[in-house]
Image (cartoon, rainbow, N blue to C red):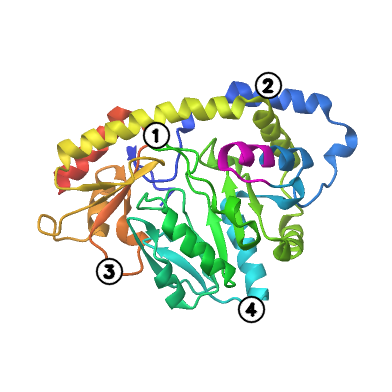
């Protein structure tokens, strides 16, 4: 799907790629290269460059309320590799099921494919912990800061219930999806900040800078760290050092924080443009998750649209507009809908795409 060309790309998960801070990246790269010694070009620590692991701990403390030591951090090739490493380690521990949110990311289920992924319903307060207990799964993967695709935030009472479940022996895998992109509400602390001994935390710069960098981090409880480092060493010996050092420089210099403030403004304008276009061209659609993130979820009234959302997305693609049908991200029956990314396109393109979808409806 990512490779299919489209005149208007409204797929979720892409930031404003045109805003990538090229000048700041080049400055950081020159500064890093000027300070490297010959041994720095050899094989490094499979956990990642010490400079980046230290920078990540400072970033997480400032932005996500997580208190950690650089030794707690492992640098990975994005959240996708973090999940793949966890699958291998959990299987070796005898864990065969990881519960997932319903609706929840198709991509996450694909990364967890060797394991069972029993669905746990999400409502207006987040994942239902009573339903999680009923699955009997020993682990669960959550997007608590901005649930994908509904956009809900895990509420305070649900957090307390989840912490009780974790203290009873459960493991939480926290995908901190879209946590930095918020517009109409304050940030919520990461689950890792509250119960580090029971939470594997995964984050990346794919939504902050660009997915092409393939740079992320994984913080796991001590019981899993050695096995994760061994798995990382066997897969690729560790991430490329130079991009890690450049990212560390961007974090420590304040350039990444400045970039985040810039793209928040860009993304908010584009979100507002999409909401306006939906009101104009899709008046019967219900919008979900507008307060944060890089996408909106819309659900369609079955009384006005009797078709499948897959057929609607297919028809839109035939007219040059690419988006995700909501049914891709569900395992249980659900009303038809779409997941519409707004961050990577101009307001004009966004309006054009939504208008096409409205015409098809």
Q: Quadrant of residue 282?
A: top left
Residue drawn where x is 37% and y is 60% of the image:
329
What residue sits right under mark 4 in the picture?
A: 94
Query: Which mark is first along the chain, 1 or 3?
Result: 1
Residue drawn where x is 70% and y is 64% of the image:
224
Span of residues in magenta: 57-67
Determine which of the numbered discs, if any, sits on residue 27 in the image. Answer: 2
Determine which of the numbered discs, if any, sits on residue 120 in the image. Answer: none
Is residue 112 among what the camera can see? no
> How many angstroms separate mark 3 from mark 2 (CA)?
51 Å
Which dot, 3 or 1, sits closer to the camera?
1
Residue 220 x, y percent position in the rendering: 67, 58
Query: Which mark is first along the chain, 2 or 3?
Result: 2
Left/right placement of residue 176 relative to residue 9 reads: right
Residue 319 x, y percent position in the rendering: 24, 44
Task: Give the camera-side residue of 229 and 141.
Answer: 141
Around disc 2, counting alpha carbons within 10 Å, would you say few (fewer than 14), some (14 to 19), or many (20 or more)? Answer: few
> How many angstroms separate mark 1 from mark 4 (CA)?
41 Å
């Amino acid at each position: 799907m990512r490779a299919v060309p489209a005149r208007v790309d409204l797929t979720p998960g892409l930031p404003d790629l045109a805003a990538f801070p090229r000048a700041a990246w080049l400055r950081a790269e020159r500064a890093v290269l000027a300070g490297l010694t010959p041994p720095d070009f050899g094989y490094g620590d499979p956990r990642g460059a010490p400079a980046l692991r230290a920078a990540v701990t400072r970033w997480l403390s400032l932005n996500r309320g997580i208190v950690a030591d650089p030794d707690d951090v492992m640098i990975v090739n994005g959240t996708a590799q973090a999940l793949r490493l966890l699958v291998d380690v959990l299987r070796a521990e005898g864990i065969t099921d990881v519960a997932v949110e319903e609706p929840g990311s198709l991509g996450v289920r694909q990364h967890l494919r060797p394991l069972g992924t029993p669905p746990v319903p999400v409502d207006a307060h987040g994942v239902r912990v009573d339903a999680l207990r009923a699955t009997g799964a020993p682990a669960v993967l959550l997007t608590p800061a901005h649930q994908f695709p509904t956009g809900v935030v895990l509420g305070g009472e649900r957090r307390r219930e989840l912490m009780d479940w974790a203290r009873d022996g459960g493991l939480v895998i926290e995908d901190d999806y879209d946590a930095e992109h918020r517009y109409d509400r304050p940030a919520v602390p990461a689950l890792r900040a509250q119960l580090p001994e029971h939470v594997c935390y995964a984050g990346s710069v794919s939504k902050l800078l660009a997915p092409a960098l393939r740079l992320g981090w994984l913080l796991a409880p001590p019981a899993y760290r050695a096995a994760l480092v061994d798995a990382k060493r066997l897969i690729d010996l560790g991430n490329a050092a130079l991009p890690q050092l450049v990212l560390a420089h961007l974090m420590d210099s304040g350039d990444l924080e400045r970039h985040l403030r810039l793209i928040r403004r860009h993304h908010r304008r584009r979100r507002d443009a999409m909401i306006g276009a939906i009101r104009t061209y899709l008046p019967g659609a219900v919008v979900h998750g507008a307060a944060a993130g890089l996408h909106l979820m819309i659900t369609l009234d079955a009384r006005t649209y009797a078709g499948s959302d897959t057929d609607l997305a297919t028809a839109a693609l035939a007219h040059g507009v690419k988006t995700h049908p909501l049914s891709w991200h569900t395992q249980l029956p659900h009303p038809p809908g779409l997941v519409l990314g707004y961050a990577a396109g101009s307001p004009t393109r966004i309006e054009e795409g939504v208008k096409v979808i409205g015409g098809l409806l």
